[in-house]
Image (cartoon, grey):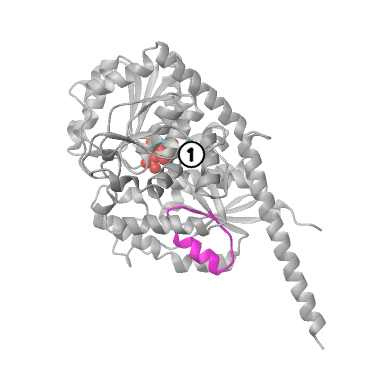
Amino acid sequence: MGSTTQDLHVLFFPFLAPGHIIPTVDLAKLFASRGVKATILTTPGNAPSIQPSIDQANDSCSLRQPIALSLLPFPAAEAGLPAGCENMNDIVVTNLDMRFKFMRAIELLRQPFAQVLRELFPDAVVTDYFLPWTQDVAAELAVPRIVFHGTSLFFHCVSHSIDRFKVLESVPACNAQSFVLPGLPHRIEMQRSQFRDSGKVPGLTVFLERIKNSEERSYGVVANSYYELEPDYAEHYRKVVGRRVWNVGPVSLYNRNEIEKSQRGDDTSIDCNHCLRWLDTKKPVSVVYVCFGSICKLPIAQIREIALGLEASEKAFILVVRGVRGNDSDWLPEGFEEEVVGRGKGLIIRGWAPQILILNHEAVGGFVTHCGWNSCLEGVSSGVPMITWPMFAEQFFNERLIVDVLKVGVGVGVVEYADMCAERRVVTWEEIRRAVGRVMDGGKEAEEMRRRARELAEMARRAVEEGGSSYVDVGELIEELMERRKAAGAEQMGSEEQARGNCP
Ligand code: UDP
């Protein structure tokens, strides 16, 4: 009997941060829905944010195979971290030293990871691009490693252009003038201040080099993107950067029902029904949703400006505040909660919001985002134009894709890269009001953006449906892994027969 996809086993290993774990769980669901045995590897401290999502998926009829969870003990003590500190989200508000220790702890997972590979012996591993050492382990054990890119292909093409043309070497560090990134399908202008100064973080340049090198040696790349979103960059990535890539996203669309959508990541800090009922009372495209992802913690001064800007915009809003830096008691302008929130004009979620449920509600007409890739894609997949407010990591590049290439957003006006816990310029209420107005106040520019956003959302929906571009890419990857498995099986049978034949 020939083997089927049921025999294929793929192990998924995300980097330990919400923005990496969430799409990897979606990805595992996708593979399981196509009949592949999927196992997610994480640490005990991260299991509670994954297990409910897996349980829900396993109970639904959408999967053809149940997803399994496998745990590696996290070496917190060995790396000098407090017990229970197992996620990037647990350490960002503290200093750089804690981040080094966290990365050290992750590197210490190398031997346990090798042990898991020996025990489970999967047909392939899909590991995060932030885990370059998994390539070496997988290669030693002859398991193909596929890199999971939790970000846009646009970003990878831009990074390649910057390296290839040594762009930053010719631009003075303090120059505020914009320059064009060479060799890309579009004219992309940026400023030096929008780039991270890798030299300021010891070891970062070496780490980024390791990521690149591991990626070059990997079996290929699975991207959370869809061909129609960035076709020029999908081609550029294949032809110029020279990697094999399967575009399988947007992976958030594999959460089909409301329970799945509300169980992504942490427990929500608001009753989802209450949130949806509140949105039901608002007119279509009248509400602004403000959320800065899973790990950004803003200073009080900034949150107050946001509150004032939203009030001045006269738009209904949902404001998500994950964490506050500063004295917690006066984080909102005086009287704001009674005056604005109390009158039903706004909803404040302190903690974790059911983001994709909110974005998919017809009342939501604009999304103020920090431009994390998951949020960008979730905005695009919901057909909601964005007000872009990048802060760090690759967010300034994502902003260029949203604003200049896709033309589905406007920038709030931030051009200064500031690391996760660094001090940053406070964006004023007036800047916020103006950017919100450009998206929400109607007019030709806003209508065009909304039309394009809806078109992209429709394309995203079609991409993941049977016969769509992402559906086909996943099928091709699974097919290829099946062929590999069959070939390996035949080879093994051949050598067993030969060994038997050689027996006296
Ligand atoms: N998210 C959410 N609720 C929140 C904050 C974040 O569901 O209150 C989810 C969001 O939908 C996205 C992920 O967390 O899937 C954040 O990833 P992103 O790449 O946007 O940003 P990061 O957190 O990595 O900076």
Image coordinates for residue 285, horizontal then vertical, percent: 44, 16
Residue 382 or residue 151, whichever sits in front: 151
User: Amino acid type of disc 1?
Assistant: Gln
Q: Please give the name of the residue rendered at 75% of the width and 74% of the height, measured from the top-left corner.
A: 495
Residue 353 seen in this snapshot? no
| In the foreground, 168 or 134 | 168
Mark 1 lies on a secondary structure that is loop
Extreme bottom residue here? Answer: 504
Whether residue 351 sits left or right of residue 418 in the image: it is right
Residue 346 in view (yes/no)? yes
Residue 59, given in percent of the width and then of the height, sits at 61, 43
From which residue to which does the magenta span run? Answer: 126-146
In this picture, residue 445 sits left or right of residue 383: left
Label 1: how many residues lie within 10 Å, few (<14), some (14-19) or many (20+)?
Answer: some
User: What residue is drawn where x is 68% and y is 35%?
Assistant: 467
Residue tagged 1: 263
| Quadrant assignment, res 404 | top left
| Image: 180 above or below 79 | above
Q: Quadrant of the N terminus?
A: bottom right
Residue drawn at (68%, 59%), measured in percent from left and top?
Answer: 484
State which image quarter holds ligand 1: top left
